[in-house]
Image (tube, rainbow, N blue to C red):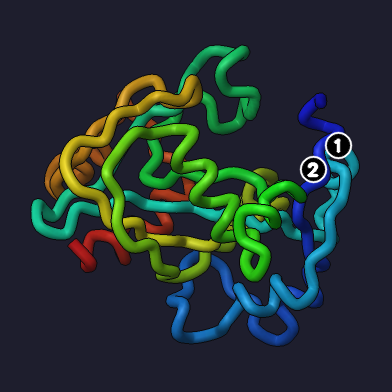
Amino acid sequence: MKKEDQLIMAIKKEELFEKDYFQGFLSADKVDFQKRILDNYQYIRRGDIERDFNYKQPIGYVVLIDKEEKKVFAYQRSIKDKDYTEKRLRGKWSLGIGGHVDKEDKSRNKENPIEGGTLREAEEEVAVKRGEMKIAGYINDDLDDVGRAHFGILYLLEVFGDVVGKGAEIKTGKMMKREEVNEIIKNPDYILENWAKISWPFLEKFL
């Protein structure tokens, strides 16, 4: 099936935000957007909705955390057309693994297909011994077209030992301490994607 023909999860913006609109990062204990999505979502053909800004496409954005070592997985997205089709994110550095929630993800987690889709993405992209995954907050960035179409559900996934990138979308990556991530942020030769920039202050405090 072509990507544009996939049925993906979407929610009308007014049903998502109601009176709780925000720009940037919001902690999960402020508003239960996840429940709001699960109560109101529908599946829409991907090609029909990518430029329809009346909807938001929920994206599970999972950050791999080693609590004992106080490290986070940082990686550079592939720069090749065949490996990473989203041109607007190609080659950028990221702190989270994520993707659209497909209709098939409901078979992985009937009660919460967002979690099901998020774990599917993580399993496709990395090999690692993992522990508990929990929701940490939400990302909304309406300052560019990528952000206007999507809504991030930030999860933290506890991992143990090395993380090995196995998906074609990852060019290079490793577990990094807070100081190493800050070096990437400061380096003009590297470009950190917007969602990573938005979530980093929270993640840095967590580490």
Name the residue rendered at 14%, 46% in the picture.
177
Looking at this view, is 186 or 200 the one in front?
200
Image mark for residue 50 = 2
> How many labels were placed on the picture?
2
Q: Nearer the viewer, residue 120 or 75?
A: 120
43 to the left or right of 116: right
In the foreground, 17 or 47: 47
Farthest left residue in view = 69
Instruction: Determine crowd level at label 1: few under 14, some 14-19, many 20+ residues with C-alpha closer than 10 A.
Output: some
Residue at the image position 43 percent from the left and 52 percent from the top: 62
Residue 162 showing in the rendered view: yes
Q: Quadrant of residue 174?
A: top left
Q: Position of residue 40 (x, y in %)?
A: 79, 74
Residue 71, image x, y percentages: 17, 49
Q: Residue at x 32, y 49 (%)?
A: 64
Circle 2 SS class: loop
In the image, residue 18 above or below residue 56? below
**What amino acid type is highlighted by mark number 2?**
Glu
Pick whichever, 58 or 133, lies toward us: 133
**Under tag 1, what secondary structure?**
helix
The residue under label 1 is: 47
Q: Of the residues shown, which amino acid type is indicated by label 1?
A: Gly
